[in-house]
Image: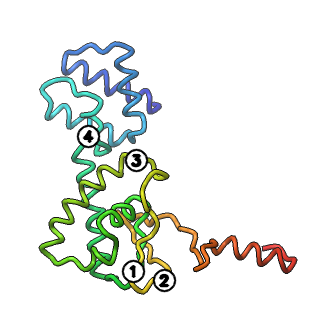
Amino acid sequence: MTNRERFVAAMAMLSGVFNRQLSDEAVEGYWLVLKAVPMDDLARATMKALAECRFMPTPAELLEFSGRGGPRALAAEVAVAWGAVRAAMDRHDYTTSVDFGPLVNAVVHNLGGWVQLCAASIPELEWRRKKFEEVYAAFKAKPIGELPSSTFCRGSFGGAPVSIAIGGVLPPKMIAEKSNGVPEVVRQLADAKAIGRNP
């Protein structure tokens, strides 16, 4: 059975249980929203809808039930990101440069930067967490290229950043820059060409 066939079977079950006939256009609308959801997650969402809904769930509700969208999914994502930031503060402190990936880096920069965040007192951190949640939600809606200041978070001693995993996923490697602003990989290629060898 293909994913599309499994999806259509789930929609048929929901429309039958909730006594709501879906047009072909409605089924296509559900598919557009839910086609990227893994089938196991869609099955869980269908079971949750059957157990909790009084009316036919919308595509947004099914997406939320699958754990792939909606306010609960965003809140869980923010909690994991904040947990990674707090763990990095405890482990690395303000002296070490860190890299959480573009989105969280941009949020930390928006909160005043890594050094200032690490200098906050425990009571201040509760307020900063709330601000972190707000900024994260706003920045999440932007394409990565439009995020302000998404480079790694520089510690007071500088140096290469330590990559920090968020939810078990390390950020993509950033090209290290030398003090003259030339990316290290470009400098190495130029040096290799100058002495006549292949890099």
Q: Earlier in the sequence, mark 2 or mark 3?
A: 3
The residue carrying mark 2 is 159
Q: Which coloring applies here?
A: rainbow
Image quadrant containing the N terminus: top left
Give coordinates of residue 105: x percent, y percent. 39, 65
Q: Earlier in the sequence, mark 3 or mark 4?
A: 4
Give coordinates of residue 124: x percent, y percent. 15, 72
Q: Earlier in the sequence, mark 3 or mark 1?
A: 3
The residue carrying mark 1 is 155
Q: Say few, some or many: other residues with alpha carbon within 10 Å of mark 3 (under 14 / 14 to 19 / 20 or more).
A: few
| Labels 3 and 4 touching (C-beta < 8 A) | no
Q: Is residue 181 above or below residue 68?
A: below
What residue sits 27% from the left and 57% below the top? 78
| Labels 2 and 1 touching (C-beta < 8 A) | yes
Q: In the structure shown, which secondary structural element does the residue marked by tag 4 occupy?
A: helix
Q: CA distance from mark 3 to mark 4?
A: 20 Å
Q: CA distance from mark 2 to mark 1?
A: 8 Å
Give coordinates of residue 136: x percent, y percent. 30, 55
**Mark 2: amino acid:** Gly
Name the quadrant containing residue 187.
Answer: bottom right
The residue carrying mark 4 is 64
Q: CA distance from mark 3 to mark 1?
A: 26 Å
> What mark, if any, has residue 142 been given in the picture?
3
**Mark 1: amino acid:** Gly
Q: 196 or 115, which is in the foreground?
A: 115
